[in-house]
Image (cartoon, rainbow, N blue to C red):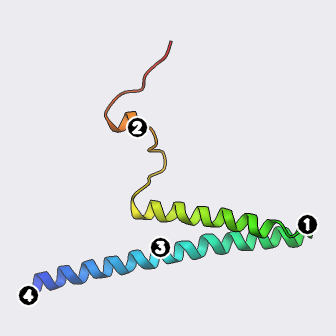
Amino acid sequence: MRERDKAKNRKETMHALAMILQLGLTILVCMGMSLAIGYYIDRLFQTTVWVPVMMVIGILAAIRSMLVLAGRYSPGSSEEGKADGDSEEKSD
């Protein structure tokens, strides 16, 4: 294997490891912050309902963040007509 191929392979491996680390940290932060907020609200109002609600929100936020990081979803790109080069249609 040539030296440049080894360097390219090493660079791709480091990129993949960085992506895995970033995905893991994203999940941890989203769920941790939602858990902390839910716990704080439960302690503040002396209830027991907010931790599970905030955990569901944290899980959904983690899934969305993973999709954004993976490049499968980009916010604001839900308009399919603009992707095809069509201009906005005006209805009179």
Image marks 2 and 4: residues in contact by CB distance under 8 Å: no
Going by the image, does 87 lie left or right of 75? left
Residue under numbered circle 1:
45
Whole-angstrom CA distance, mark 2 to mark 4, is: 45 Å
Inspect the image, locate mark 3, and give the three-letter code of the amino acid beneath it. Answer: Leu
Inspect the image, locate mark 4, and give the three-letter code of the amino acid beneath it. Answer: Met
> Which mark sits nearer the N-terminus, 2 or 4?
4
Compared to residue 3, the image places residue 59 above or below, namely above
Inspect the image, locate mark 2, and give the three-letter code of the amino acid beneath it. Answer: Glu
Within 10 angstroms of label 2, few (less than 14), some, or many (20 or more) residues? few
Q: Nearer the viewer's eye, disc 1 or disc 2?
A: 2
> Which mark sits nearer the N-terminus, 1 or 3?
3
- Report the residue at 48% width, 50% height from top: 75
Image marks 1 and 3: residues in contact by CB distance under 8 Å: no
Whole-angstrom CA distance, mark 3 to mark 2, is: 27 Å
Residue under numbered circle 4:
1
Q: Name the image quarter holding residue 86.
A: top left
- Report the residue at 61% width, 66% height from top: 59
Q: Position of residue 78 (x, y in %)?
A: 46, 42
Q: Position of residue 32 (x, y in %)?
A: 66, 75
Q: Secondary structure at mark 4?
A: loop
Compared to residue 47, the image places residue 78 above or below, namely above
Residue under numbered circle 3:
23
